[in-house]
Image: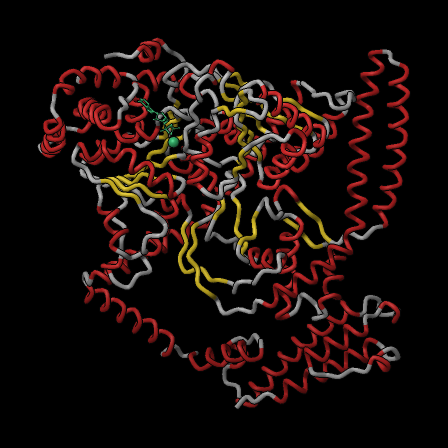
């Protein structure tokens, strides 16, 4: 048995990947040679093969030596029990997986089945196998779907589900199986949870020996940007988020005129570029009317630009926004205004030091995070939406107060700031396995990262049938509304022709806008998906390749509008007659930040040699261009003429877009790398701490551990207490916590108690005086001009900080020095009152 594909494969020479594939494809022939004899075995004898293989391995046979026969056995078990005989390309994929590499196999090539080969052989070598899926639904589906193959060979199969008790028998028994399916979340959280349990018998997870990660790019790359976190409440003041939120709202309204002017400038610049493009083209065509029009627009826009620029120079900028990094920074003016609004004194003293950070997080929440795009609000909770996949990330939280700031923005209950009890990045979690392998339709673009971070090689496997999908060139429009209209028309046309469509959108919000337009303009029946309900989704996506009867009785193609991740993992099989109409058409409404995600979408059409096509619709207003390549976009506008509503085909523009994507990919790679570096120390601690904890729970060598601890404690305490400066150090520590004073041992050695007290208090007063003059500067902007003074703010602050009641009427006639004096002496009085005995 030797499929035609393998013969084709063997002919291929050239690149590294082709050489690799060629070497791997020998397995197809070798396994093929065992096919006839394996077929002759009855079910009993087939199952008995497992015992024989295990015995052989035990006796010293190398796994590689039985690999071909073992694969033939699995292939036969699959043919008999699930009605699928592994294609040769699946055998190749299976071998790549067995060796702990990433196999890139296109969507619909049957990765689920390919994984059984590697899983079986790994099981034979005495290791447990975890197969990692992107959601619970797929974990269950794959375990049930592939179950008969494993069971026929005497293996047990389980699937972890999120709703299983975290220390219950149900979960434990899934882990006891030879092959366990589950999501990265469940595997990762079980690891963390196990290490927080107080007895060994509550722990559920078996050892982490070998894992096959399905949709490996989604898990090790997209999801790897947010670590898994188990948190508990920290008893913290949550009202400060609400206070910051109020200040932020005022800042935003103060800043709005700057913002508006800035937008006017942007649009004028774009208009100028556009007009230049038009002018150049009109001149080429020698079209007088067009030249005149373009000239006119050019002049008006230039005039507008000038006016706006003057206005900008007069407007106050309170903060600066970096949309591409989702960062906001307060300017000097912003800090000043915020201090004034908050009324708590200078942000740069004492407990106020928190404010700038709180405000920046709150501003980020308001300005760079969008509801329905970056997050949704459900049941009074803020739930993060994964920007790559559109999936809701239940239980994940932004850190550093950002999540609380978004909660304050949305006026839902601000959850108590949480403290992290246990955390791990996905990268470090999967490094805990002795070996991992991965499979996905899109890995090649990220091959470098797989190698650098995970030491995973990527092998791209050719498709079983040649791919005949028609990947069409991008259609580009100047503005978003033009593009939007064109998309709606295109969807209607294609569906009318009987072809089904899968329309990919980048956010829930856009998804819904498009859906509304389809209904309004053409009354088109369609399905709307946004990765909220995996199971329902799978049923809908499965129908995405079919037709339905329209109201006029004619057959129309189904229309499915989906965010990126919706239904990933579910096969889109063409309905009867659809192949003749041209198959499934995939329409991307925007390019994503990563080319990989675009390829993933395209790949939904044309599976297993099916007819199909794909095309992306872009506009110059798309986020990718506006946010990540604003300057380039303006330049590109000047390369083209006007023609309203007409698409633009331009090589240089397509190249520019790809460049913008590469830039974002690199940036995202950096983010993931720094997350990993940041986790490095914790990773070290975690490993030591968890293994020590386990030893203790297991009661292993407890005596030694305790003895060591006692020794260490005695040594440490003797060193501290018997130190000749011990009493001095105690005084220094006490002065620091109670007075914020910073003494040195040499200052107080041999000094009398009263003298030390004087010293401490003098330092405390100096510190207070310093803080006072700093804060005074914030309230009394220009000392020589009382009209610039914020007297109300000053009084409020003096009251809250020193319990000094200043009279506004009196202050106006005082000099700043007098006011300062008054505050300093009030502060000194308070310090003097403190008891030092
Ligand atoms: P992938 O995960 O690679 O996108 P799936 O594992 O979901 O693909 O399989 C896609 C489809 O191909 C499924 O409907 C499956 O039944 C079918 N399939 C896979 N392998 C075979 C095979 N060897 N013979 C027949 N059908 C197969
Ligand atoms: Mg799959």
Residue 116 lies left or right of residue 790; in this view the side is: left
How many marks do you count on the picture?
0
Seen at 29% across and 41% down, the residue is 130
**From what the image shows, is residue 698 above or below residue 724?**
above
Q: Quadrant of the N terminus?
A: top left
x, y (%) of residue 740? Answer: 58, 76
x, y (%) of residue 514? Answer: 62, 34
* Residue 415 visible: yes
**Closer to the camera, 235 or 408?**
408
Seen at 27% across and 42% down, the residue is 180
**From what the image shows, is residue 227 above or below residue 525?**
below
* Residue 447 visible: no
Q: Colour mode? A: secondary structure
Seen at 67% across and 25% down, the residue is 486
x, y (%) of residue 416? Answer: 52, 65
Quadrant position of residue 791: bottom right
**From what the image shows, is residue 10 above or below residue 362?**
above
Q: Quadrant of ligand 2?
A: top left
**Closer to the camera, 243 or 174?**
174
**From what the image shows, is residue 218 above or below residue 474?**
below
Residue 355 lies left or right of residue 465; in this view the side is: right
Residue 755 lies left or right of residue 363; in this view the side is: left
Quadrant position of residue 106: top left
x, y (%) of residue 727? Answer: 44, 82
Seen at 51% across and 25% down, the residue is 548
């Amino acid at each position: 048995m030797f499929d035609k594909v393998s013969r084709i494969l063997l002919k291929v020479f050239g690149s590294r990947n082709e050489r690799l594939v060629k070497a791997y494809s020998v397995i197809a022939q070798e396994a093929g040679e065992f096919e006839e004899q394996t077929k002759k075995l009855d079910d009993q004898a087939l199952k008995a093969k497992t015992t024989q293989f295990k015995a052989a391995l035990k006796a010293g046979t190398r796994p590689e030596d039985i690999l071909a026969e073992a694969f033939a056995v699995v292939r036969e078990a699959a043919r008999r029990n699930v009605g699928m005989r592994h294609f040769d390309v699946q055998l190749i994929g299976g071998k790549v997986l067995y060796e702990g590499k990433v196999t890139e196999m296109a969507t619909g090539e049957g990765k689920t089945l390919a994984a059984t080969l590697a899983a079986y052989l790994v099981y034979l070598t005495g290791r447990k196998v975890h197969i990692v899926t992107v959601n619970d639904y797929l974990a269950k589906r794959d375990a049930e779907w592939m179950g008969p193959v494993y069971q026929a060979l005497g293996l047990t199969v389980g699937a972890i589900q999120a709703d299983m008790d975290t220390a219950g028998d149900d979960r434990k028994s899934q882990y006891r199986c030879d092959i366990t399916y589950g999501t990265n979340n469940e595997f990762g959280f079980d690891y963390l949870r196990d290490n927080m349990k107080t007895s060994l018998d509550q722990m559920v997870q078996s050892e982490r020996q070998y894992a096959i990660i399905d949709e490996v790019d989604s898990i090790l790359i997209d999801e790897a940007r947010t670590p898994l976190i188990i948190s508990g409440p920290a008893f913290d003041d949550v009202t400060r988020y609400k206070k910051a939120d109020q200040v932020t709202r005022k800042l935003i309204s103060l800043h709005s005129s700057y913002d508006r002017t800035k937008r006017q400038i942007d649009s004028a610049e774009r208009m100028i570029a556009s007009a230049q493009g038009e002018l150049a083209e009109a001149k080429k065509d020698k079209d007088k009317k067009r030249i005149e029009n373009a000239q006119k627009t050019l002049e008006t826009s230039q005039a507008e630009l000038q006016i706006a620029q003057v206005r900008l120079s007069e407007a106050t900028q309170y903060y600066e926004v970096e949309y591409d990094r989702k960062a906001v920074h307060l300017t000097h003016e912003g800090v000043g205004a915020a201090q004034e609004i908050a009324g708590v004194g200078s942000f740069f003293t004492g407990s106020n030091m928190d404010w700038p950070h709180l405000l920046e997080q709150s501003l980020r929440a308001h300005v760079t995070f969008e509801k329905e795009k970056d997050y949704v609000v459900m049941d009074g909770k803020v739930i993060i939406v994964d920007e790559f996949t559109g999936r809701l990330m239940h239980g994940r939280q932004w850190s550093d107060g950002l999540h609380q700031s978004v909660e304050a923005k949305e006026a839902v209950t601000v959850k108590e700031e949480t403290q992290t009890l246990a955390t791990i990045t996905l990268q470090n979690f999967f490094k805990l396995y002795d070996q991992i392998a991965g499979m996905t339709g899109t890995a090649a673009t990220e091959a470098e990262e797989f190698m650098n971070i995970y030491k995973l090689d990527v092998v791209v496997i050719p498709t079983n049938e040649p791919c005949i999908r028609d990947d069409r060139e991008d259609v580009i429009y100047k503005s978003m509304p033009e593009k939007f209209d064109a998309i709606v028309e295109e969807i209607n046309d294609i569906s009318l022709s009987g072809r089904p469509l899968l329309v990919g959108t980048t956010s829930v919000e856009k998804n819904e806008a498009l859906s509304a337009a389809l209904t309004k303009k053409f009354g088109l029946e369609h399905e709307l998906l946004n990765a909220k309900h995996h199971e329902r989704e799978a049923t809908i996506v499965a129908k995405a390749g079919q037709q339905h009867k329209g109201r006029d009785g004619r057959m129309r193609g189904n229309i499915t509008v989906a965010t990126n991740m919706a239904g990933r993992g579910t096969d889109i099989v063409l309905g009867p007659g659809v192949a003749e109409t041209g198959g499934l058409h995939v329409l991307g409404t925007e390019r994503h930040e990563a080319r990989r995600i675009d390829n993933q979408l395209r790949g939904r059409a044309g599976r297993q040699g099916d007819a199909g096509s794909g095309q992306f619709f872009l506009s110059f207003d798309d986020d990718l261009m506006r946010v990540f390549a604003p300057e380039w976009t303006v330049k590109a506008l000047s390369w083209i003429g006007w023609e309203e509503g007409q698409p633009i085909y331009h090589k240089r523009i397509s190249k520019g877009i790809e460049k913008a994507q590469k830039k974002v990919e690199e940036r995202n790679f950096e983010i993931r790398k720094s997350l990993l570096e940041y986790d490095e120390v914790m990773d070290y601690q975690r490993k030591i701490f968890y293994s020590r904890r386990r030893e203790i729970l297991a009661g292993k060598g407890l005596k030694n551990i305790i003895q060591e601890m006692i020794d260490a404690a005695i040594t440490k305490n003797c060193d501290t207490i018997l130190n000749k400066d011990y009493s001095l150090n105690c005084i220094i520590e006490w002065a620091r916590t109670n007075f914020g004073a910073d003494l040195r041992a040499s200052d107080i050695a041999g000094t009398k108690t009263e003298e030390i007290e004087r010293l401490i208090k003098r330092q405390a007063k100096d510190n207070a005086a310093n803080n006072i003059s700093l804060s005074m500067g914030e309230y009394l902007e220009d000392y020589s001009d009382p009209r610039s003074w914020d007297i109300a703010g000053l009084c409020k602050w003096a009251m809250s900080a020193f319990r000094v009641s200043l009279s506004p009427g009196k202050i106006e006639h005082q000099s700043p020095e007098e006011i300062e004096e008054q505050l300093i002496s009030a502060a000194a009085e308070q310090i003097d009152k403190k008891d030092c005995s």
